[in-house]
Image: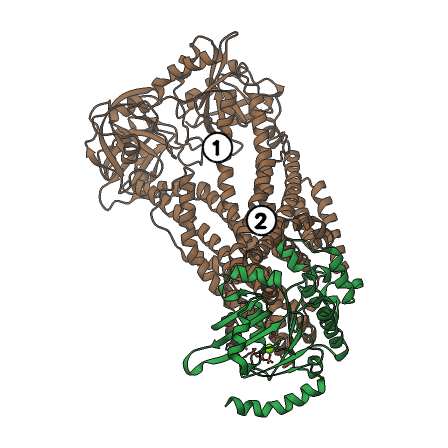
Chain colours: A green, B brown
Amino acid sequence: MSAPLSAPDETEDATNSITRPGRYAACAVHAVRAYGTGDTEVRALDDVTIGFPRGRFTAVMGPSGSGKSTLLHCLAGLDTPTGGQVFLGDTDLGTLSDKQLTRLRRDRIGFVFQAFNLLPTLTAGENVTLPAALAGTRLDQEWVDRVVVSVGLADRIGHRPSELSGGQQQRVAVARALAARPELILADEPTGNLDSRSGAEVLGLLRDAVDSLGQTVLMVTHDPGAAGYADTVVFLADGRIADRMDAPTPQAVLDRLKAFERPARTASR
Amino acid sequence: MGRLTVRNLLAHKRRVAGLVIAVLLGTAFLSGALILSDTVKSSITGLIRDNGAGTDVVVRNATDVTDRPGTDRAAIPAGTADLVRKVPGVASASPVVVGYGQLVDTDGEMITGNGPRIAGNWIDDPALNPYRLTEGRAPQAADEIVVDRASAKQGGLEPGDRITVLTPEPVPVTVVGIATFGEADAFGGASYTAFDLAGALQHVARDPGLISSVSVRLAPGADQEAAAAAIQQVLPPGVQAVPGSAATQEQVDAVSDGFLAIFRTFLTVFAVIALVVAAFSINHTFSVVTAQRMREGALLRALGASRRQIRSQALGEAALIGVTASVLGLLAGAGLAAGLKAMFAAFGFAFPVEGLQFRTETALIVLPVGIVVTLVSALIPAVKASRVPPVAALRDAAVESAGVPVRRTATGAVLIAAGVVATVLADGFLLLGLGAAATVAGVLVVAPAVVRVLGSALTAPFARFGAGPMLARGNVLRSPRRTVGAATAMVVGIAVVTVFAVFAASLKSGAEGETRDTLVGGLTLGDSSSAGWAGGGHSPELTAKAAEVPGVATAVGLQRGNLLAFGSSRDIMAADTARLGTVLDLGVEDGSVEALGTGSIAVSDTAADDHALKVGSRVPVTYPDGTKAELTVAGVYDRTTLVGDYLIDRQAWAPHSVADLDALTVLALAAGAQADQVKAAVEKVAEAYGNPPVRDRDGYVDASLAMVDQFVTIVYVLLALALLIALGGIANTLSLAAHERRRELGLLRAVGAERGQVRASLRWESAFVAALGALTGLVLGAFLAWSAVGVLAGSGDQQVPVTVPAVQLAVLFAAGTLGGLLAGTRPAARAAKMDILRAVSVE
Ligand SMILES: Nc1ncnc2c1ncn2[C@@H]1O[C@H](COP(=O)(O)OP(=O)(O)OP(=O)(O)O)[C@@H](O)[C@H]1O
Ligand SMILES: [Mg+2]
């Protein structure tokens, strides 16, 4: 594999390649997200430089509080780094106004949260097309139908979220992320609240989106099984990139996690 | 538990602020109404007391035919003062002449105002004269006058000016002095023109041998009652001596029971309307807050708090809010009273008021009312909340379900059916009231079901206007009960306004039609005012001159007056009935109203019904001068807008009347006369009389309706306050809802909703709720007004066609909806500013 993903120790090299537009679907360059100042400063992201290649499924793992969600929020334009840069394609998010960031989220990013993804007042179908409705545009109906069928919700399209199971709700959220054909799909523990069967369905959908549609997916997870669906796993610890693994299997990830917990800690000291 | 209550209140400042504002607005109006009426009362009665302060005994005509303040008794012989002076203990006795005196400024225009135009004699004894000269000197010749400072300012008068006073004959005079009433520029809204005694007897008194009364000052230390009794001994029959304090008290009582009582009731009615609307608003706010607390406080119950505790906590909170908000409302009432005062002044009803009168009684009314309304409004949601099982409270569905129980809808339908039947069949106001209450309650009960069934279709067309309305639609429909709760105050507010609007329009068009039918003469001269003193009147001399203008066939003057009949004071109209038929068509139903002479009277059919009169009935009356007579009913007529209920001939009236003043003159044109030319010619004649307006029929109808319109406008302003409270409630619950839905709003922003779109969705929601409330209120109000007008028309024989003022109602609907849009602005702006990350992070 010809370094599709920058390793944390190749900083110089990575920076050069990352700043070349278009090579990555999204990337962070020396990104820092600090809370508070002075003694009480907490760095949720501590000089993170990483690129996410197009058409690949990347999983982000790490202990609780390691900065996974923060990284996702920064890439999505929901949060702003206090230092460094974040790019979507060749767009530097730091240069965008609140309104432009909003449009970027709407038009170029699909987001799947751990829970509470849907507006309870809208039907499943309306939730799927919500970003387009907000944009005042119409989606390609044939495509939407295909997405809805592929997530297995064709017969549930008129139901409201309260009438759907948790797994079904997450599939609606995935469908929403896919429907607009965004440049990047971000998912923060999308299977965190699901039983293993429902979780497998959702992960299968994301995998399929990458394989058959060429989508780029970035997913945070605590579950080595879920990470096994990804092409690459990136490990975060204390706000830094601690490690990475290509072609992960659940067992390898689990071993790595176990092995990595201690050395990573000591290494960062 | 008490500590928890306080802690709970502090922890939810926004909720508390919302509740406090709802209660505050309601109580502030009540407080303001009471403060203003107390203030007006204290200052008007204060003026009256000042007026009579130095007078120990009043000698006057014993006959009183009216309890209306500002209307005078008949005269007494001028020699009475000399008789009184001889009584031991009398230090000074001044003859007093009081009559009509309209000032005309140097440009020939009348100096008009909101009070009687009084003329009289300048009294030299300062103890008996409440006026003080501030400029110039007292009158010393029959054509010299002193005027009150308010009129002087208004007309730009200065000592030395040559002007005219209409008494009502035009009298050329010289202003020699300017006076204040005590410290004030004038005696309330009244104007005052003082001649010297000779001038007053010559110009103001109807007969130089007659005066109005005698004001007596006693030697220091003398007893008023004893002196009055002593004076009474020397008086001729029909003349009485009254202690000054008693005479003053009579006047105070007359205004207190009359105008002031009406004014207080009038304001209180609107305060109560506002309070009812506020109660609905408070109730809904409490429901929303309770629902929120149910979910948030599920832990409390899980830990074992009993239902009783939950309920008493909610009520404790309500009590605290009720007390705080009522106290604030009481204080805010002072500001509102000042505002109301300014509003009345803007409409030409300036009260002679300085400062504000705050009585303990006001607090004793406002505080309990505010607290009780708050507690009752809070009780229902609190009881409901305590019935919800703890586990169910964790789920939204248990607290506010989208579903509407069938039983509820059925109950509502039955209520509506009963209400409508009662309202339609009602022939009295009691049944009408009960029917109306049932209808309103029924509508509010079935409304959620209606929203559930029809809401989707009704709001669907708006979804095309973008994401804002589309999202708002979903939120309006998510809990029909809550939506209806939010709109209820609006429904009630708009319904009240609609009832009033339809009622006013119907009465107005009824009056307009009747006035047109009555007025067969081509022109009118003088004011259309029915308020008595606002326009005053003009000299019968002018009527006579107008009759001689080429092109005028007849000119008939109408004089207002009072006499005693059937045990109380009656407003009468006196006219030259021999010729009245050429200018007015009274719609005679029986007998004849022509040539009534000195022994006959004509009455309206309403009066005939009330007193069981028919042609030939005998009516004993007492004229203002004390003369008793028995009149025979010669005719019964239908149309009362111009002449009222009792009509007599001038021949019968003139010998006994207090003033000789034509309130209105109606002219009939000669065949072939050009109305424009005649009008111009009559105006020319009227110039010397202060230019009373000359109008054709349309002009007269418009002018008489202008007064109604002004009154209607005042009522609209007062009702607008109730609508403001309703809108405040909508804003309030919207901001609570936005807080409740912050997760959803955050999600919306996360998936790409712009701030503007979030704002728009909330504003649309608020507009939907307001429009829903307004529409329901309009329909409800129109129906109730239709029934009420029917009952009114059925009770009298007045023709009252139901008139729906489409334009006003459209404006009302638009204003309600726009108001909703505006009410949503602040909560929407706040919601759009929220932090997306905080909102979407899983709690
Ligand atoms: N608003 C904030 N103020 C202060 N510190 C914050 C704030 N938000 C996040 N943090 C801190 O930033 C760090 C990273 O948080 P983040 O939510 O990215 O972790 P995470 O890896 O997603 O954890 P988890 O697996 O539990 O979701 C944590 O130490 C957290 O306490
Ligand atoms: Mg996280």
Please state which of residues B275 and B590 is positioned toward the viewer in this rendering.
B275
Q: Look at label 1 and name its amino acid.
A: Met
Looking at the rendered structure, whether the residues under marks 1 and 2 are on a common chain is answered as yes
Which dot marks residue B290? none
Residue at the farthest front position = A2
Q: Using a 10 Å C-alpha cutoff, classify the residue at mark 2 as few (fewer than 14 neighbours), some (14 to 19) or many (20 or more).
A: many
Q: Using a 10 Å C-alpha cutoff, classify the residue at mark 1 as few (fewer than 14 neighbours), some (14 to 19) or many (20 or more).
A: some
Number of numbered discs visible in the structure rendering:
2
Q: Taking B305 as reference, is B332 above or below it?
A: above
Q: Taking B37 as reference, is B123 above or below it?
A: above
Please state which of residues B136 and B420 is positioned toward the viewer in this rendering.
B420
| Quarter of the picture holding the N terminus of chain B | bottom right
Location of ligand 1 given as a quarter of the image: bottom right
Residue B787: name its quadrant: top right
Please state which of residues B779 and B123 is positioned toward the viewer in this rendering.
B779
Residue B659 image position (x, y, % from top left): 39, 25
For mark 1, give the secondary structure.
helix
The residue labelled by disc 2 is B493
Q: Is label 1 or label 2 in front?
A: 2
Residue B448 image position (x, y, % from top left): 70, 56
Give the letter of the chain under mark 2. Answer: B
Q: Taking B829 as reference, is B217 above or below it?
A: above
Residue B803 image position (x, y, % from top left): 62, 33
Q: In screen coordinates, is B747 left or right of B647?
A: right
Residue B327: name its quadrant: bottom left
Residue at the farthest right position = A155
Q: Look at label 2 and name its amino acid.
A: Gly
The residue labelled by disc 1 is B707
Residue B424 image position (x, y, % from top left): 71, 41
